[in-house]
Amino acid sequence: MSVSVLFVCLGNICRSPTAEAVFRQRVIDAGLQERIRIDSAGTGDWHIGKAPDRRASAAAGRGYAMDDLRARQVSGDDFQRFDYVLAMDDNNLADLEDLRAAAGAGEGVVLARFLDVLGEDGPREVPDPYYGGDDGFDHVLNLVEKACDLWLERLRERL
Ligand code: 4NP
């Protein structure tokens, strides 16, 4: 069995590529790279083809590979290509729900907030760091690391 997961934010240059890079490293460390397929995308189209924001790329300092990632926009087809579609915030989730309804596909896809895995007491959203300072990116990376550990445990159960 294998499982696939798509991380989604607004621009696909800050939060979701960070989640993609962190989760890929966790999956490699667990030796599961042949069994878990990972990608990320944005609901918006402004940054298509661009590399991650250089402030997000600071995650390289914690050992995550960001350089080869390029932004793309999510599409209705993604609901036929992924088992899990994980939204960084409530706006992303609402946009993805609309997209899934318009595509008329993907009822079996788990569409959820990325931070749902932290439980009821945790934060619901990964805050958009784009217009803030470096602290915001550090906060995003801390949240992403925590949630990725828990998603890996959960996805392992599907393998
Ligand atoms: P992301 O951050 O959704 O985490 O990639 C953003 C990137 C770009 C913009 C907003 C958020 N923007 O407005 O261009």
Image: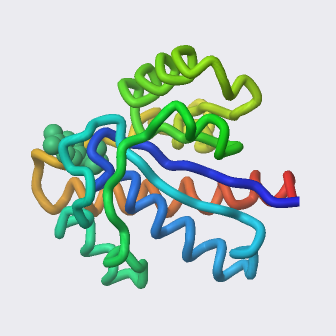
Position of the N terminus, as image quadrant, is bottom right
Left/right of residue 73 with respect to residue 2 in the rendered view: left
Q: As rendered, which of 117 and 30 lies closer to the eye?
A: 30
Query: Which residue lies at the image location 36% right of the left edge and 76% below the top edge?
Result: 68
- The image quarter containing residue 27 is bottom right
- Residue 117 locus on image (x, y percent): 62, 43
Position of the C terminus, as image quadrant, is bottom right
- Residue 69 locus on image (x, y percent): 36, 68
Vertical position of residue 107 compared to residue 71: above or below? above
Query: Which residue lies at the image location 49% right of the left edge and 68% below the top edge?
Result: 22
- Residue 73 locus on image (x, y percent): 36, 43
Q: As rendered, which of 77 and 147 lies closer to the eye?
A: 77
- The image quarter containing residue 62 is bottom left
Q: As rendered, which of 137 and 65 lies closer to the eye?
A: 65
- Residue 126 locus on image (x, y percent): 38, 42
Query: Which residue lies at the image location 46% right of the left edge and 58% below the top edge?
Result: 19
Query: Which residue lies at the image location 22% right of the left edge and 54% below the top edge?
Result: 136
Q: Which quarter is ligand 1 in?
A: top left
Left/right of residue 106 with respect to residue 6 in the rendered view: right
Left/right of residue 72 with respect to residue 109 in the rendered view: left
